[in-house]
Amino acid sequence: MRITKEKKQENHDRIVTIASEMFRDRGFDGVGVADLMERAGLTHGGFYNHFKSKEALIAEASIKGFIETGTRYADHDIADVIDAYISRAHRDARGLGCPAAALSGEAARLPEDARAVFREGIAGLVAALESRLVAHQAVGNDARAQAINLLAKAVGAIVLSRACPDTSALADEILDACRADSHAVLKSRT
């Protein structure tokens, strides 16, 4: 039985959405094609009707994750972005969080074309932060360098906090210290 182009696209989009969340939650190697397709309500064999490889899906799912992250913070002031990103809520919502914080370590071992997706996603986050810094008038000599520094600190805070046990006081201390320092940098630039 053949499906319509619309239904095929709907299935494709559902696979990408589910994969994006699962990859951020479990990592690229922690998600098997069979498990993913079962969760999408589709057959394992149907995967290759949508993607030439798991790496192709990784690229699409990562793009989706970066778009979601950019959209989530699009209407926020820089101070609100800091509070929302460097938070326990972001830390604990691994599958819905930023791909940079969830998957950068794994992305470094991917083929060049998949790593290019991360380069573009991270560049988009830097550009968004840079524009918010300019709008906030928190610009010293180089808004881009400040945006890179802020993103690296925010991603690092989430990564290190996630590495600690959930009940560890250090997990929250890392978030608190990096969030406070990011706000202090903003205040010193205005």
Image (spheres, grey):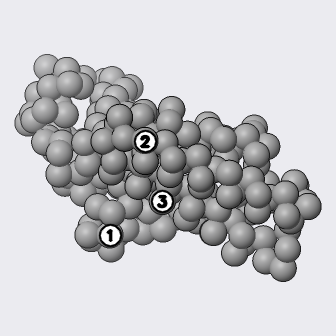
Q: Position of residue 24 (x, y in %)?
A: 34, 43
> Which label lies toward us, 3 or 2?
2
Q: How far apart in space, not on screen, are marks 3 and 2 (Cα)?
A: 17 Å
Residue 108's disc number:
1
Q: As drawn, is 8 to the left or to the right of 87?
A: left
Residue hosting label 2 = 169
Q: Residue furthest front?
A: 169
Residue 90 shows up from this direction? no
Q: Earlier in the sequence, mark 2 or mark 1?
A: 1
**Circle 1 or circle 3, nearest the eye:** 3
Q: Earlier in the sequence, mark 3 or mark 2?
A: 3
Which of the pair 181/33 is nearer the observer?
Answer: 181
User: Which numbered disc covers residue 133?
Assistant: none
Secondary element under disc 2, as helix, strand or loop, is: helix
Q: Amino acid under label 3? A: Gly
- Within 10 Å of disc 1 (Cα), the crowding (few <14, some 14-19, many 20+) is few
Closest to the camera, between mark 2 and mark 1, is: 2
Label 1: state its secondary structure: loop
Which residue lies at the image location 49% right of the left edge and 42% below the top edge?
172
Under circle 3, the secondary element is helix
Which residue is at a point 13% across and 42% down the rendered structure image?
32
Q: Which class describes the residues within 10 Å of circle 2: few (<14), some (14-19), or many (20+)?
A: few
Counting from the top left corner in percent of width and height, residue 71 is at 62, 39
Q: Nearer the viewer, residue 147 or 35?
A: 147
Residue 99 versus residue 167: which sits nearer the camera? 167
Give x and y (percent) for residue 120: 52, 64
Q: From what the image shows, is residue 136 above or below residue 83?
A: below
Kindly identify the amino acid type of the residue bearing the numbered disc 1: Ala
The residue indicated by pointer 3 is 156
Estimate the spatial distance between the alpha carbons at disc 2 and disc 1, rounded to whole Å.
29 Å
